[in-house]
Image (cartoon, rainbow, N blue to C red):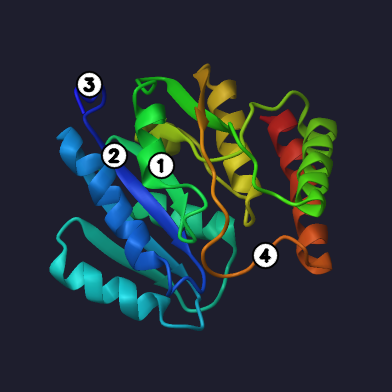
Amino acid sequence: MTAKPVIEGIDVVILAYNEEGSIEQAILDVHDALGPWGIDYGIVVVDDGSTDRTALVANRIAARDPRTVVRSHARNKGMGAAVRTGFAAGTRPYVTMLPGDRQIRADQLVKLIELAGPAVAVTSLYENRPNDALRTLASRTFRAVLRAALGPTPPLEGTYVIPRDLLDEVVLTSETFTVNFEILHRARQLGYEIRVATIESHLREQGSSKVFNPRRILRVVTEVGRLGWTLRRT
């Protein structure tokens, strides 16, 4: 890798819920991607109330890896809470997140980091979409709900890189994956530039989708509406 890092350091939050079969490789992916670059980085694994051996595997790795720490929820709290826990546990000037099922691999982070900088939020879109028709329909429906509730929404399909300064300026409220769009809307409110990288996605290696659950869908729709009301008042 010949390019020099353009940021001082980054915390990579790995979100894990019943990912015992993929979490070790997800951690190794970060080392493989960022280690050769010479950038200061840390890994925060958030075990969101897993009922399998995810926490055991992650803690075993952290015991011998000074760059890795683990934070666990006693019960499954949802992606929003997991993101907030992970971001709060880091110390470096930039943060990002990855799924523990390796649908997004750590080598794709380089594309976002190259665009990162002060007062810049870097988001991402997939260059490929290994989804079935039902998932594609769900994604398009969710985006329509977002537009209706929040207005024009920064593009986001994968992950993002943001300065920690942004997190110091906002109070996040979302409990589901809506938190990711809340972060980008807050960034735009504060005058951040939004930059977009194109990344690859992969089929899920471990766990199952948490989306197709009527109770969760209702929760997300309710949360989006509440977030739209909050954003209009601030």
Q: Quadrant of the C terminus?
A: top right
Q: Earlier in the sequence, mark 3 or mark 4?
A: 3
**Helix, strand or loop under label 1:** strand
Q: Earlier in the sequence, mark 4 or mark 1?
A: 1
Q: Which residue is mark 4?
A: 210
Q: Earlier in the sequence, mark 2 or mark 3?
A: 3
Quick check: marks 2 and 4 in contact, CB under 8 Å? no
Q: Position of residue 83 (x, y in %)?
A: 49, 53
Q: Which residue is mark 3?
A: 3
Q: Which residue is mark 2?
A: 10
**Circle nearer the viewer, 2 or 3:** 3
Q: Position of residue 60 (x, y in %)?
A: 24, 76
Q: Which one is nearer the viewer's eye here, 11 or 2?
A: 2
**Circle nearer the viewer, 3 or 4:** 3
Quick check: marks 2 and 1 in contact, CB under 8 Å? yes
Amino acid at pointer 2: Ile
**Helix, strand or loop under label 2:** strand
Q: Which residue is mark 1?
A: 96
Q: Which residue is pictured at 24% across the width and 60% down the height?
A: 68
- From mark 3 to mark 4, how far is it between C-alphas? 37 Å
Quick check: marks 4 and 1 in contact, CB under 8 Å? no
Q: Earlier in the sequence, mark 2 or mark 4?
A: 2
Amino acid at pointer 1: Thr
Q: Which residue is pictured at 83% across the width and 59% down the height?
A: 218
Q: Residues within 10 Å of mark 2 (few under 14, many from 20)?
A: many
Amino acid at pointer 3: Ala
